[in-house]
Image (cartoon, coloured by chain):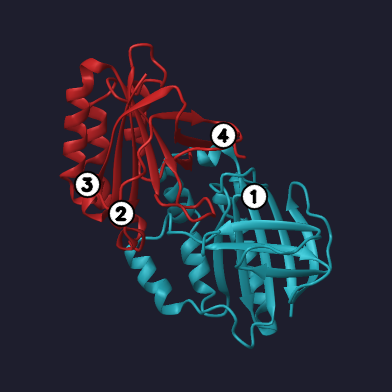
Chain colours: A cyan, B red
């Protein structure tokens, strides 16, 4: 496996307790008690479900935006960040059929995806995983993992609302929200 | 497997005869007699090597460029296109560490990758496969497959020379050229 591959394994064991699992758009995922994030070959025999994705190069971020992100984005695993949310998303064929400049225009110039996320830094740490080009049929295109302190739940809720109200989200055809605690 | 996954299987059998296989930059691949292009689960037991990649959304092409490409690019499998070339490429960490706008600037504004390819349409048909995000350790980032008629070999050679002379190619740390005939 690639060192950039992460598996999100839901079942009866794992460091994270699944507090809530609900579909936002489209079909939901099976309920489960716990979730483990695995960055190694999978040895879990029985589980409710496994989602896989790779971290990769940035697809839309510009040089100036990246400088700001690097300055402000926190690492994962902070002691106080005992809340996490996993959000698997699938976008429509209409999205993937757009050219790069059309996707960037919707993503940032019109939907302010990067700018919105930036306003919640350093409260909300985030890691994006890509599933679309794994070479296997995957139910989602992206898995985004967020970590934050209990005091920032309200901020995190606002971040999700702002993104879901954007033009970009019209291209989301499946989205599940999995709230976790450790 | 994803419907977008293609395997390039080199060994003793296959529709394409390997005419020449040589390293342009970095390590070469093992020699083999023939190559098969497979868009189905692999059943080949013994082979010299297998390279895999997925077709995907465009990463740099703009709307106006795409319109021109769609108008001019030929399909694969034309009867007269009895020559093919497979070019696996790996780019450096320095390339992947650049932001999207920096990569686009080098790729097109300074290296004219799209414009150069366009000048050889419709003579040279092309399909790009991505390997970097397959989730398995892959020796290359891209596999490009080209098809053309014997009369266009000189044009194809010129296309490769022009691309290899570009600033973008300074980021190529491994490249193999596999010439084929059927």
Do pointers 2 and 4 mark residues of a single chain?
yes
Of residues B143 and B22, the one drawn nearer to the viewer in this rendering = B22
The residue at which mark 2 appears reads as: B103
Q: Is residue B92 left or right of residue B50?
A: left
Of residues B16 and B4, the one drawn nearer to the viewer in this rendering = B16
Badge nearest the viewer, 2 or 3: 2
Identify the element where label 2 is drawn: helix
Which residue is painted at 40% across and 60% down in the image? A61
* Mark closer to the chain start, 3 or 4: 4
* Mark closer to the chain start, 2 or 3: 2
Measure the C-alpha gap from mark 1 to mark 4.
Answer: 30 Å
The residue at which mark 3 appears reads as: B109
- Mark 4 falls within which chain? B
The residue at which mark 1 appears reads as: A140
When the figure is inspected, residue B49 is found, relative to residue A120, above or below; the finding is above
Toward which corner of the image does residue B94 lie, by quadrant? bottom left
The residue at which mark 4 appears reads as: B44
- Mark 1 falls within which chain? A
Q: Is residue A157 visible?
A: no
Q: Residues within 10 Å of mark 1 (few under 14, many from 20)?
A: many
Badge nearest the viewer, 1 or 4: 4
- Image mark for residue B150: none
Q: Position of residue A46 (x, y in %)?
A: 81, 60
Quarter of the image containing the C terminus of chain A?
bottom right
- Mark 2 falls within which chain? B
Q: Position of residue B140 (x, y in %)?
A: 39, 49
Which residue is painted at 40% across and 78% down in the image? A71
- Mark 3 falls within which chain? B
When the figure is inspected, residue B36 is found, relative to residue A88, above or below; the finding is above
């Amino acid at each position: 496996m690639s060192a950039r591959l992460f598996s999100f394994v839901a079942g009866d064991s794992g460091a994270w307790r699944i507090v809530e699992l609900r579909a936002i758009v489209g079909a939901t995922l099976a309920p489960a008690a716990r979730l483990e994030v695995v960055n190694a070959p999978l040895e879990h025999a029985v589980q409710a479900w496994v989602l896989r994705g790779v971290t990769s190069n940035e697809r839309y971020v510009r040089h100036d935006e990246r400088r700001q992100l690097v300055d402000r984005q926190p690492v994962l695993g902070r002691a106080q960040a005992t809340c996490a949310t996993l959000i698997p998303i699938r976008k429509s064929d209409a999205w993937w059929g757009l050219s790069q400049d059309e996707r960037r225009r919707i993503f940032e110039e019109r939907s302010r995806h990067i700018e919105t996320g930036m306003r919640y830094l350093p409260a909300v740490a985030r890691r994006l995983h890509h599933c679309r080009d794994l070479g296997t049929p995957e139910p989602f295109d992206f898995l985004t993992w967020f970590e934050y302190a209990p005091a920032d739940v309200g901020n995190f809720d606002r971040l999700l609302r702002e993104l879901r109200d954007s033009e970009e989200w019209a291209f989301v055809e499946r989205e599940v929200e999995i709230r976790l605690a450790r």
